[in-house]
């Protein structure tokens, strides 16, 4: 499995000119690279190639479905006309910066473009069904999504962005979330990092105001060894010091929980695996005994190809173990929703 770069590669002249004492506060996404890496990682996880994140047969099928959804995100992103995605005007940007507010917030009226993106995603998914037999059940879900009236579709989008699972159809939500991700990631990719202010709180995305899906320890260049939170909607990553709760921002009672070797061996597969430096440290849960919450942290130092949203989706065993220990998940994954009964 090859290496997948999300951030732009620096030219030799740029490398020499870097101030290596400066920590990049914000990493903006490159949408096509991001979604391409995510789709590849979902398939790598589904195939059991990541030693530190064991995946069972039931989850494997869902990861492949989500990989197909991300494939559709790639196609829609690539087809977006250059002038289709716009940013707020200069005055709105200046006001947001002055008041330390996200410049492209998820709150308020959504650009109408998101509905066109949603329809295009469904179109692309229909074409994928023909070539991917594992998607045989998808047409029924796509038909239900196409049948949603304007009010129902907007209500689902509201719930997704507010992370309100109550009353939401867990089969519909990932597809609505995927359309919203395409729009906000495209906007974030066109933003100047200096236009995103430092918010009053460090636990929300400084670009769109959404919650992080997980955190990641990055390697390479100025980001070497630093921890970033990745937004679940616009995919921006912002720096937060390590050993600090990404929910309450406390640092007195932080601990790290991981799968033990017995858990990892439970899903042995007869396939080549991607050897990590230390599989136990690829995926861990950062728990806080002050607010009793947790958020997963993935370490690129132990697996170069970690992708926070994909790895979070695949590591449900870790969620179960930490939840059984009494910790509540800090925020959800936009591509996975549970019914009220669950």
Image (cartoon, rainbow, N blue to C red):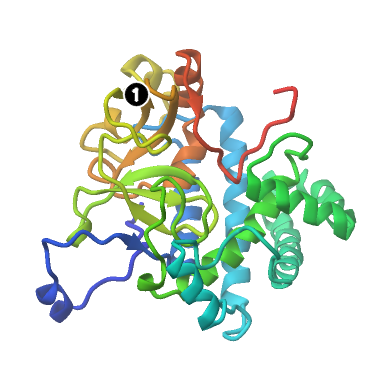
210 is higher (above) or lower (below) than 263: below
Rendering coords of residue 260 (x, y %): 33, 18
Residue drawn at the location 29% of the way across and 60% of the way down: 25
Horizontal and vertical percent for residue 238?
Answer: 36, 55
Is residue 36 shown above or below 253? below
Question: Quick check: can you spot residue 44?
Answer: no
Q: In terms of depth relative to the viewer, which is nearer, 327 or 44?
A: 327
Residue 76 appears in the rendering: yes
User: Which residue is the site of mark 1?
Assistant: 258
In the rendered image of this protein, does residue 212 appear above or below residue 283? below
Horizontally, residue 278 falls left or right of residue 101, namely left
| Number of marks | 1
The correct choice, above or below, for 129 with respect to 30 in the image is above
In this rendered view, identify the residue nearer to me: 146 or 194.
Answer: 194
Q: Residues within 10 Å of mark 1 (few under 14, many from 20)?
A: many
- In the displayed structure, does residue 105 sit left or right of residue 263? right
In this view, the residue farthest toward the front is 99
Q: Position of residue 65 (x, y in %)?
A: 63, 46
Q: Quadrant of the C terminus?
A: top right
Image check: 57 left or right of 252?
A: right
User: Which x, y percent locates residue 307?
Assistant: 41, 49
* SS of the residue under disc 1: strand
Question: Quadrant of the rendered structure where residue 118 is?
Answer: bottom right
- Looking at the rendering, which quadrant does residue 50 occupy? top left
Report the residue at 69% width, 52% height from top. 175
> Residue at the location (72% across, 53% down)?
157
């Amino acid at each position: 499995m090859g290496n997948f770069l999300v951030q732009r590669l620096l030219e030799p002249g740029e490398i020499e000119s870097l101030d290596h004492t400066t920590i990049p506060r914000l990493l903006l996404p490159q949408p096509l690279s991001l979604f391409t890496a995510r789709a590849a990682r979902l398939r790598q996880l589904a195939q059991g190639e990541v030693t530190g994140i064991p995946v069972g047969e039931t989850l494997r099928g869902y990861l492949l479905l989500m990989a197909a959804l991300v494939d559709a995100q790639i196609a829609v992103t690539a087809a977006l006309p250059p002038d289709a995605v716009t940013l707020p005007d200069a005055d709105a940007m200046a006001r947001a910066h002055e008041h330390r507010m996200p410049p492209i917030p998820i709150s308020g009226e959504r650009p109408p473009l998101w509905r066109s993106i949603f329809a295009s995603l469904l179109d692309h998914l229909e074409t994928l069904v023909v070539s991917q037999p594992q998607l045989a059940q998808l047409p029924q879900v796509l038909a239900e999504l196409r049948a949603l009236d304007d009010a129902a579709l907007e209500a689902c989008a509201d719930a997704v962005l507010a992370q309100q699972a109550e009353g939401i159809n867990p089969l519909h939500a990932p597809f609505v979330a995927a359309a919203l991700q395409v729009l906000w990631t495209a906007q974030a990719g066109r933003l100047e990092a200096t236009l995103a202010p430092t918010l009053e709180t460090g636990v929300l995305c400084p670009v769109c105001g959404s919650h992080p899906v997980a955190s990641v320890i990055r390697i390479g260049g100025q980001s070497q060894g630093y921890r970033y939170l990745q937004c679940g909607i616009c995919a921006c990553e912002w720096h937060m010091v390590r050993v600090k709760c990404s929910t309450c921002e406390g640092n007195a009672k932080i601990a790290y929980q991981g799968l033990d070797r017995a858990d990892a061996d439970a899903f042995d597969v007869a396939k080549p695996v991607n050897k990590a430096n230390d599989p136990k440290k690829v995926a861990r849960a950062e728990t806080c005994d002050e607010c009793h919450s947790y958020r997963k942290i993935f370490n690129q130092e132990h697996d170069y190809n970690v992708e926070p949203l994909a790895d979070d989706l695949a590591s449900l065993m870790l969620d179960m173990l930490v939840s059984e220990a009494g910790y509540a998940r800090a925020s959800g994954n936009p591509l996975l929703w549970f019914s009220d009964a669950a």
